[in-house]
Amino acid sequence: AIQLTQSPSSLSASVGDRVTVTCRASQGISSALAWYQQKPGKAPKLLIYDASSLESGVPSRFSGSGSGTDFTLTISSLQPEDFATYYCQQFNSYPLTFGGGTKVEIK
Amino acid sequence: EVQLVESGGGLVQPGGSLRLSCAASGFTFSSYSMNWVRQAPGKGLEWISYISSSSSTIYYADSVKGRFTISRDNAKNSLYLQMNSLRGEDTAVYYCARDSDELDYWGQGTLVTVSS
């Protein structure tokens, strides 16, 4: 199974900060990577697919980049509603796998 | 509007069985593959099963293989997960998710608690 390693596992940031989360795959997955946001008690929400494509309705402050084994989720200017946990997920092959998550907290 | 609504969760004793359902609406259910994903309390997301649109292809995570069975009824726009031989480590919120390669729509989840 392809392992996804997310870093950091948590971070503290202020409103307006630029935030970057990284996801590293144990083998190449081309651009078959998605990013999700999850708030407490809620289902995950798709933000980015195909590594860099923004899901419809998602604010443009979210962006994704990377291919192969190294990927990045960037929030250009953190907003109060962005405090949540973020997960990467690969869909290159089964079993589908998720990163361990990055919790973004208020500084 | 795409909607996925899970049901069937609850408290079950170790070794017991439970059947989860996921009712789909707002899209052509028979055209999409579907997945089950779970999340143990305070933990991350774990994919557990996939079924193609025609049920011809099915995959399971090793953690549930031989104990869980995924199925679907396209006439009823419904996805199912039959869970047998349940263990404490199966305690989690179970989500159904639509497959567009990425998992683009998720249900609200149903909680399964395995405890005596």
Image (cartoon, helix red, strand yellow):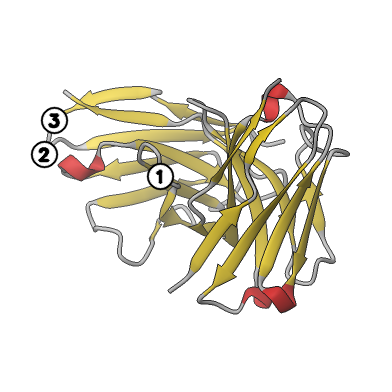
Q: Residue furthest right?
A: B66
Q: Amino acid at mark 1?
A: Lys
Tell me if label 3 and label 2 are in contact, CB under 8 Å.
yes
Query: Which residue bears the numbered disc 3?
Result: A14
Q: Residues within 10 Å of mark 2 (few under 14, many from 20)?
A: few
Q: CA distance from mark 2 to mark 1?
A: 24 Å
Q: Amino acid at mark 3?
A: Ser
Q: Residues within 10 Å of mark 1 (few under 14, many from 20)?
A: few
Tell me if label 3 and label 1 are in contact, CB under 8 Å.
no
Question: Which secondary structure, mark 1?
Answer: loop
Q: Earlier in the sequence, mark 3 or mark 1?
A: 3
Q: Is residue A28 visible?
A: no
Query: Which residue bears the numbered disc 2?
Result: A16
**Which marked residue is nearer to the observer: mark 2 or mark 1?**
1
Could you tell me residue B7's position as x and y percent?
60, 53
Q: Is residue A48 left or right of residue B63?
A: left
| Mark 1 chain | A
- Residue B39 location, quadrant: top right
Residues flagged by tags 3 and 1 on a common chain: yes
Query: Which residue bears the numbered disc 1?
Result: A42
Question: Which secondary structure, mark 2?
Answer: loop
Question: Which secondary structure, mark 3?
Answer: loop
Q: Quadrant of the N terminus of chain B?
A: bottom left
